[in-house]
Image: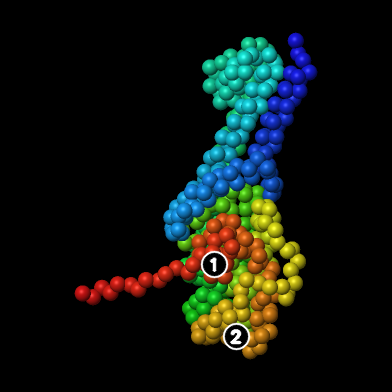
Amino acid sequence: MTTVRDVLLFFAGALVVALVVISAISTVVVPRGVPVRLSRAVFLSVRRLILLRTRFQRRYEERERVLAYYAPLSLMVLPMVWLTVVLLGYTAMYWALGERPLREAFFLSGSSGLTLGFTHPPDLPTTALAFTEAAVGLALLALLISYLPTMYTAFGRREALVSITSTYAGTPPSGTTMLERFSLIRGLEELEERVWEPWLQGFVDIEETHTSLGALALFRSPSPSRSWVTAAGSVLDAASLLASSVDVEDTASAQLCIRAGTLSLRAVSTFFGIDFDPDPGPDDPISITRDEYDLAIEQLARAGVPLQQDREAAWRSFAGWRVNYDTVLLALAGFTQAPYAPWSSDRSPATLHRPPVLRPRRSNRG
């Protein structure tokens, strides 16, 4: 005889299963950044375990080896959590349909959800329910299988951009180094074709993929010394220096790149719940000091880069560009535990890297 308790238990189990399915669809299928509590809880739980493991490792290289497993491990744990919650939800529904004791209801749920078939439903209602559970289990597996190729395709596009940026901006990347190298080797006019246009498209791609495929932001570069965050920061700093301090006629492409990069980093920050001021004032403080700016300008002057004569106005202009992305850049550098890079992860409160120690090369002479 069906009781009110059984009806409530059945609908509670169905609600749990429906929430898991919606969570999986929102995480994998919906082409927009939809924050999902279950997925977020899984990633944050794995993150806490990873950070606990790295807490006592002083060298960044040791932490990096552990951090490289964070995103892949989270992706493997996520479908297991989905399946576990679905099994529990269907266990409640089988119990409500009269499958006793609770262990038998759980066995039937596991047999149906994992399509093992070692337990047979006793009647038509439980058989129909078993069919739906098998379909849900296969659908979750299919979603994961389709999810990974899409993610790694986007990952490949991003890392190709990061890799070529290291050629221009050095390792660790620096906006000052990028301008210096182009001035000495190719000429600043090459920046539009080689840097601003590719990164304009790259920022658009990052904004779309790193919010619709949130785990992608946490995948680390193949090289431990590279990061999409620090590479983006070096490009934005190079564009800001060019637009504010370099004596060139046309900086429209650089300014568009700054705008695209700012919107991209803000979108990713919003997806991960990082707070920032959406409308900072041009006179608001930034993390770059005037002394650091002056050192960068002196480096560019030694490389023969034509500079603006009014150094004070150039500094104010640079600060006005940098303030748009300063907070989100540092926050994402800390959130992703990015490797050392000047003007980004080196001043992020969550990383506090020290500059790498450069050891003198050994001579080949005997």
Residue 307 circle label: 2
Q: CA distance from mark 1 to mark 2?
A: 26 Å
State the residue lying farthest toward the bottom.
309
Residues 130 and 85: in front is 85
Residue 256 circle label: none
Nearest to the eye among marks 1 and 2: give it: 1
Taking the spot 62% from the left edge, 14% from the top edge, the residue there is 101
State the residue lying farthest toward the left.
366
Q: Residue 219: give x, y in percent of width and height.
A: 54, 52
Taking the spot 56% from the left edge, 16% from the top edge, the residue there is 119
Q: Tell me which corner region of the image, top left, top right, bottom left or bottom right, holds residue 335.
A: bottom right
Where is the C terminus found, in terms of image quarters? bottom left
Q: Is the residue marked by circle 1 packed among few (<14), some (14-19), or many (20+) residues within 10 Å? A: many
Q: Secondary structure at mark 2?
A: loop
Q: Amino acid at mark 2?
A: Leu
Where is the N terminus found, in terms of image quarters? top right
Residue to which mark 1 is pinned? 346
Q: Residue 237: give x, y in percent of width and height.
A: 60, 72
Q: Secondary structure at mark 1?
A: helix
Taking the spot 59% from the left edge, 48% from the top edge, the residue there is 215
Res 84 seen here: yes
Q: Earlier in the sequence, mark 1 or mark 2?
A: 2
Res 256 seen here: no
Q: Tell me which corner region of the image, top left, top right, bottom left or bottom right, holds residue 29.
A: top right
Q: Is the residue marked by circle 2 packed among few (<14), some (14-19), or many (20+) residues within 10 Å? A: some
Q: Amino acid at mark 1?
A: Asp
Q: Is residue 231 above or below residue 217?
A: below
Q: Residue 129: give x, y in percent of width and height.
A: 67, 20
